[in-house]
Image (cartoon, helix red, strand yellow):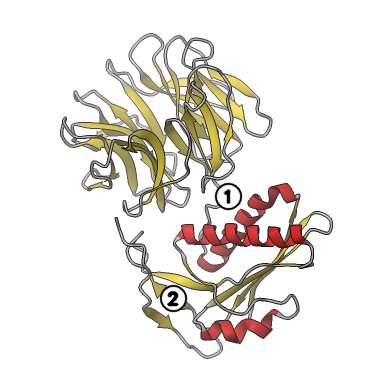
Amino acid sequence: MTSLFLGLALLTLSLQAGQAPDVYIALAGHTGEARTLALGLPPFIAADPRNKPDALLAKELHDIVRDDLLFSRRFTLLEDGPVFNGANINDILPAWKTRLAGWLLAAQTDLTDRLSLKVWLLDAGSGETAFERTYRSEASSSRAIAHRVSDDIVLALTGKNGIAHSRIAFANDRTGRKEISVMDYDGANLRALTDDGSIALLPRFSPDGRSLAYTSYKEENPDLFLLDLATGRSRTLSADQGLNVAGGFSPDGTQLLMTLSRQKSPNLYLKNLVDGSTSRLTHHFGADSSATFSPDGGQAAFVSDRAGNPQIYLLALATQRVKRLTDLNWCDSPSWSPTGEWIAFSGRVHRADRLDIFLVDVTGNQVRQLTHGEGANENPVWSPDGRFLAFITTRHERSELFVMDADGSAPHRLSEIPGNTITPAWSN
């Protein structure tokens, strides 16, 4: 496992006339990014320190933002310094600058009416304000507010979208039946989405995160349903006799790749979610399954046993031309990276091997192994920024949800979830 230590090597203090320095600190090998931004993060304060609920909420929000920023691997957090007193934030900037903070984040909570969180993000060198914003919601939505703050900081300082708002869905058998659950990307707010009393599995988020496709046996056939996450209501998408399994949504959310067997060999189909029509994509006597769209919507990666053992293939949707990518003993569960360069999948090189997580590039010329026999590892799914992979592993006997960096480093259990967990999906 890659060491988590931070090499305290100052890479750049670019002092240009009229510009503040950006302070970077080297990060020892995670995602290949060479440096992180040094961010001062003093405790958040309460508008009324005598109000205990307000003070406790300030600490809770601070800790969530802190954990989000650490998870992102984009920041080195400096926490030992003067605290904002609620008056003039510029008073504490010089002290944070001497601690090599390139940026300073401060916040104040107020529970007078609803939850109000005022946030300041400043350049520690120039004193210029990157943003000053007030977030308001019900106190029960404090975690969502903290995640919004974290994502706004990531976007403001890196130009990249954050992932703190995202969620992970999966199937789990802790009730004695397999049901679909969902939680925040960091493992918090676990809640059940289905109560079918049967087998529900293979969830797939729509691009806008408002709905979830999944397969359920509640009608004694593996039917495909679409769940509205706001209302909790589901409707049937496909109930043909035999397999009805979601692959992936198109980037614009108007189409859904599916595997249908229709009492024959499983093949790939494309469902138009606007007019309800279905078209067949493959015509094979074996099994074609687990299709996932490319980020541009022009191709699909899928699994087929047409060569004997299951391998990863690419399908050009316009021409229906097929190209084989892998040549291992076994491949399954392809997941296309949001940036388009890589397809993650589970596979094994030799028949006696356990399943591991691999990457293959879209030419098929590069294959990288990310896990190495620490239990069986399968069902990889990408974070929306393409920097992390969630996957299922049995390295501690039962099937658990783990997350690792996209280069295979820093694998860790995301949350202590009772029972066995399978088939995860990560929202945008």
Residue matched to label 2: 24
Mark 1: few/some/many CA within 10 Å (<14, 14-19, 20+): many
The picture places residue 143, in percent across and down from the top left corner, at: 64, 51
Q: Relative to the observer, which residue lies in front, 138 or 228?
A: 138
Q: Relative to the observer, which residue lies in front, 348 or 376?
A: 376
Q: Secondary structure at mark 2?
A: strand
Q: Is residue 164 visible?
A: yes
Q: Amino acid at mark 2?
A: Tyr
Mark 2: few/some/many CA within 10 Å (<14, 14-19, 20+): many
Which residue lies at the image location 60% right of the left edge and 72% below the top edge? Answer: 42
User: Quadrant of residue 328 in the image?
Assistant: top left
The picture places residue 32, in percent across and down from the top left corner, at: 33, 62
User: Quadrant of residue 253 in the image?
Assistant: top right
| Mark nearer the N terminus (1 vs 2) | 2
Residue 400 located left or right of residue 77: left
Q: Is residue 125 visible?
A: no
The picture places residue 5, in percent across and down from the top left corner, at: 36, 67
Residue matched to label 1: 165
Residue 275 located left or right of residue 160: right
**Labelled pair 1, 2 in contact (Cβ < 8 Å):** no
Q: Secondary structure at mark 1?
A: loop
The picture places residue 403, in percent across and down from the top left corner, at: 40, 47
Q: Say above or below: 349 vs 222.
A: below
Q: CA distance from mark 1 to mark 2?
A: 26 Å
